[in-house]
Amino acid sequence: MSAATARRPLMAGNWKMNLNHLEAIALTQKLAFSLTEKQLTDVEVVVLPPFVDIRSVQTLVDGDKLMIGYGAQDLSPHVSGAYTGDISGGMLAKLGCQYVVVGHSERRQYHHEDDALVAAKVKAALTNDLMPILCVGEGLEVREAGNHVAHTTAQLDAALKGLKPDQVEKVVVAYEPIWAIGTGKTATPEDAQEVIGALRNRLADRHGNVADRVRILYGGSVKANNVASIMAQPDVDGALVGGASVNADEFVRICRFKEH
Ligand SMILES: O=C[C@H](O)COP(=O)(O)O
């Protein structure tokens, strides 16, 4: 199932723990300078800097009316209080963030985030009018056992449990096979389509027609030289890009995938 033409492609750059606020300004300026108004209309381009860079990116985007969106890499499930080191959805919304990554495999692995916490973070994002970029994906063992579709659809179900269709519509799903993240091993376009198609079918089963409007991204070693074949798949609506997103020239080429 697919109605890809109705879904605006989204290229989101997850900078992870890279670039200070001065480097963030330089990269954002270069993206805005290199991409034309038409390119930024055809494809939504979003940067996801570390928390400490967001104010600088906001100032630049607002001041120069840049057509680049931005968001954060994580949020607290709580509203406020004694949670040292955490950042709330309300704080991110106040900084003009539109998006927030939730459930990235690096958070699940290094910070032991489980499905219940990921679901709470999805709700916290939606409560604050932030669009969650919900990450799901299997490790190598799960893939080799042939359980990748069951694993990722279960993660999807857990994260979206209890949401109404109008809330599900605001969620962006990112399928990121863990074995392809930062490894240079990319899933084949067919691998990506298999899982992303299954995720869309699951959305349809559980949440109805909204499934055709939810954007589902692929992430994992996306580069300028492989993005076009991944984007050619009917259910793939964009990419969540890590390493290649902190290189302005490379990310610009990724955003121009239609011209490849
Ligand atoms: O969030 C992005 C993903 O983890 C992909 O990272 P990568 O492009 O460096 O493989």
Image (spheres, helix red, strand yellow):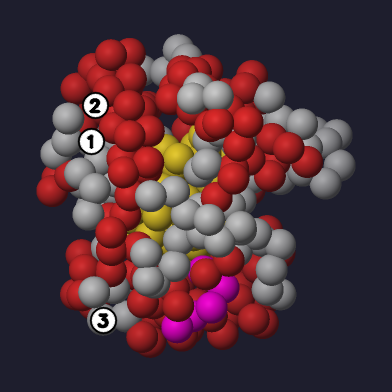
**Looking at the image, do the residues carrying marks 2 and 3 touch, with CB atoms under 8 Å apart?**
no
Residue bearing the label numbered 3 = 36
Rounded to the nearest whole Å, what is the CA distance between mark 2 and mark 1?
5 Å
Mark 1 is surrounded, within 10 Å at the Cα level, by few (under 14), some (14 to 19) or many (20 or more) other residues, namely some
Which amino acid is tagged 2? Val
**Rendered residue at 39%/72% (across/down):** 224
Specify whether residue 246 is painted magenta: yes
Mark 2, secondary structure of its residue: helix
Q: Please tell me whether residue 245 is drawn above or below residue 78 in the rendered image.
A: below
Q: Position of residue 69 (x, y in %)?
A: 42, 62
User: Position of 109 compared to 47: left or right?
Assistant: right
Which amino acid is tagged 1? Arg
Mark 3, secondary structure of its residue: loop
Sequence-wise first label, 3 or 1: 3
**Which image quarter holds the N terminus?**
top left
Residue bearing the label numbered 1 = 213
**Image mark count:** 3
- Magenta span dominant secondary structure: helix
| Residue 236 appears anywhere in the view | yes
**Rendered residue at 67%/82% (across/down):** 22
Residue bearing the label numbered 2 = 210
Mark 1, secondary structure of its residue: loop
Rounded to the nearest whole Å, what is the CA distance between mark 2 and mark 3?
31 Å
Q: Please tell me whether residue 19 is drawn above or below residue 139 in the rendered image.
A: below
Q: Position of residue 113 (x, y in %)?
A: 71, 30
**Looking at the image, do the residues carrying marks 2 and 1 touch, with CB atoms under 8 Å apart?**
yes
**Which image quarter holds the C terminus?**
bottom left
